[in-house]
Image: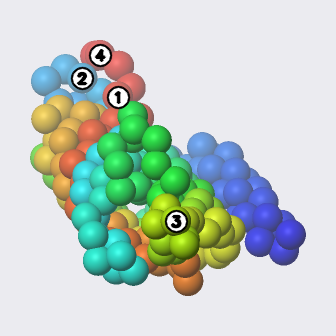
Amino acid sequence: MKIFNSIFYIFFCIFVLYINSYAQEDKEFVIDSTIFKRGSNWITLSVGTGYNFGLKSQETNADISFQLQIKKICFQTGYHITSDEFFLNRSLQKLNDLHVGVGIRRENTSTNLAVFGGPSYSFGSSFDGYNSNSIKTYKTFKTVGFYSDIQFTYKLFYDVGLGISLYSSLCKSYQVIGVQLHLYFSGAYKGKI
């Protein structure tokens, strides 16, 4: 229960800082008669492949994350899933992560680079061997872990991009690292002149 209280406290602090950030001076600029704001929040939708260290096998994964920038510090919250089967197929072997993190960002008109790391609430089940009838068995888990993410985005437009993410999700029951292709959507668009 302490972890949920800690996560609630982190979200509350982020919310207070987010509201406070509206009082800060906007850093708006114009590209081709369109107004954008630097340092805006963004969402990433990612899919990719990873390597499961415990089973020494390749897995597929997906992630949806929201990133919030307050001055020079960024915060991330999201959901990550990895499994030995593609997501439309049901598999008992899978890792789910609800993650929060803190990080930094370097942004210009054509690229966005961000690095995050922080705790995760990890749950799912992992392959545990075969029973006496040669049927696969799985063990379930719920634990605290660590999630990290490095994102590099090429901006097709200032507020929309395509990129690559390198991630790791580590807990005592499931350890996976991998690469993802992501879509980047920023809240930078403010209107036309």
Identify the secondary structure beneath mark 1: strand
Residues at discs 1 and 3 in contact (Cβ within 8 Å): no
Q: Which residue is mark 3?
A: 133
Mark 1 or 2: in front is 1
Q: Which mark is residue 34?
A: 2
Q: Residues within 10 Å of mark 3 (few under 14, many from 20)?
A: few
Q: Secondary structure at mark 3?
A: loop
Q: Is residue 25 left or right of residue 176?
A: right
Please report the residue visible at 34 percent of the width from the left and 36 percent of the height from the top: 185
- Residue 63 is situated, as x and y percent measured from the top left of the image, at 41, 49
Q: What residue is pinned by disc 4?
A: 192
Separation of residues labelled 4 and 3 (CA atoms): 67 Å
In the displayed structure, 184 sits above or below 180; it is: above
Of the two numbered discs 1 and 3 on the same chain, state the one appearing first in sequence.
3
> Looking at the image, can residue 112 be seen?
no
Proximity of marks 1 and 2: CB atoms separated by less than 8 Å: yes
Amino acid type indicated by mark 2? Thr
The local crowd at label 4, few if under 14, some if 14 to 19, many if 20 or more residues have their Cα within 10 Å, is few
- SS state under label 4: strand
